[in-house]
Amino acid sequence: MCGRFAQYRIAYEYLDKIAMQLPLPLPLPLPLPLPLRGSVNPEPIGRYNVCPQSLVQLLHQDDDGLRMEPVKWGYAPLWAQGKRPPAINARVETAATSRFFRDIWQTGRAIVPADGWYEWKKDAENPKIKQPYYITLRSGEPMFFAALGRFQRGGSLEPRDGDGFVVITSSSAAGMLDIHDRRPLVLTPEYAAHWMSSDLPPREAEELALKHGLCVEEFEWRPVGKDVGNVRNEGPELIDRPTLDDSSD
């Protein structure tokens, strides 16, 4: 699953990757680079401990171009609000047909730019003890999580009650299963651009999501200190390897 991640680069470092689109073996015309609409902060985002229910920079496509705007991490359709906590993840195997997500599958496909995410591994001898791991791309490049959301269009409207997004997750393959059996669906910049496209039919979006996520060999992971478990902690030291004191109970 994905319950905590990092998003710390300058926004343009993510946007530049999306703009560099290459041909893909899909039955779609090659999209042209889309202009960025609205403004983005030129300073680093600087978040190393992004948690659910916080506002997160979300990338989505409008008719006139790309927008990168803050949206709450957590979503429930209007008919389900108040019945249970908002979802933060959606399973790729069922999201397209689930009553909970099928509307935003058609209208709210988006991308969460990220730098890595965290998972907690239980100690074999004492399941109450959990070691956090930080997972990144071996290449060191930014990640693009496939997401679904409900959000305003046009960049000039105030967020509505019920706006929010979820990160799509897929099954972890051999090698990452010992950390967690689910992980974010990470797309290349090229597939991420197609995922957001309003010209991509829902059925083909489902095929893209099921077949074109990055494989486990693209990732690497390392243990980090347990301070990341507290949502009030923030800073680049959270993604460093733990010291001896960090590893102790």
Image (cartoon, rainbow, N blue to C red):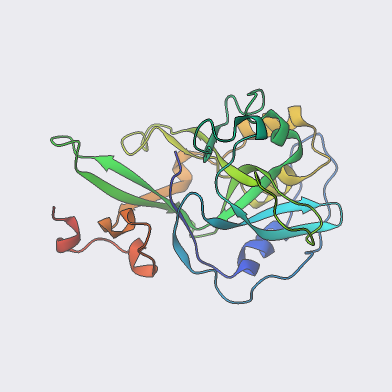
Give the residue furthest to the bottom. Answer: 43
Task: Tell me the quarter of the picture where residue 120 sits.
Answer: top left
Task: Tell me the quarter of the picture where residue 128 sits.
Answer: top left
Horizontal side of residue 92 vs 154, given as left or right? left
- x, y percent for residue 45: 54, 69
- x, y percent for residue 35: 81, 63
The residue depicted at 63 percent of the width and 24 percent of the height is 98
The residue depicted at 66 percent of the width and 27 percent of the height is 96
Q: Does residue 217 show up?
A: yes
Q: Does residue 138 show up?
A: no
Quarter of the image for the N terminus: give it: top left
Horizontal side of residue 249 vs 167, given as left or right? left
Give the residue furthest to the front. Answer: 82
Horizontal side of residue 87 vs 162, given as left or right? left
- x, y percent for residue 213: 58, 38
Vertical placement of residue 148 versus 35, above or below: above
Vertical placement of residue 127 versus 65, above or below: above
- x, y percent for residue 138: 45, 54
Of residues 89 and 242, the one drawn nearer to the viewer in this rendering: 89
Task: Tell me the quarter of the picture where residue 24 sits.
Answer: top right
Of residues 237 and 217, the one drawn nearer to the viewer in this rendering: 237
Vertical placement of residue 131 versus 231, above or below: above
Horizontal side of residue 182 vs 35, given as left or right? left
The residue depicted at 65 percent of the width and 30 percent of the height is 79
Vertical placement of residue 184 versus 245, above or below: above
Number of marks: 0
Of residues 200 and 155, the one drawn nearer to the viewer in this rendering: 155
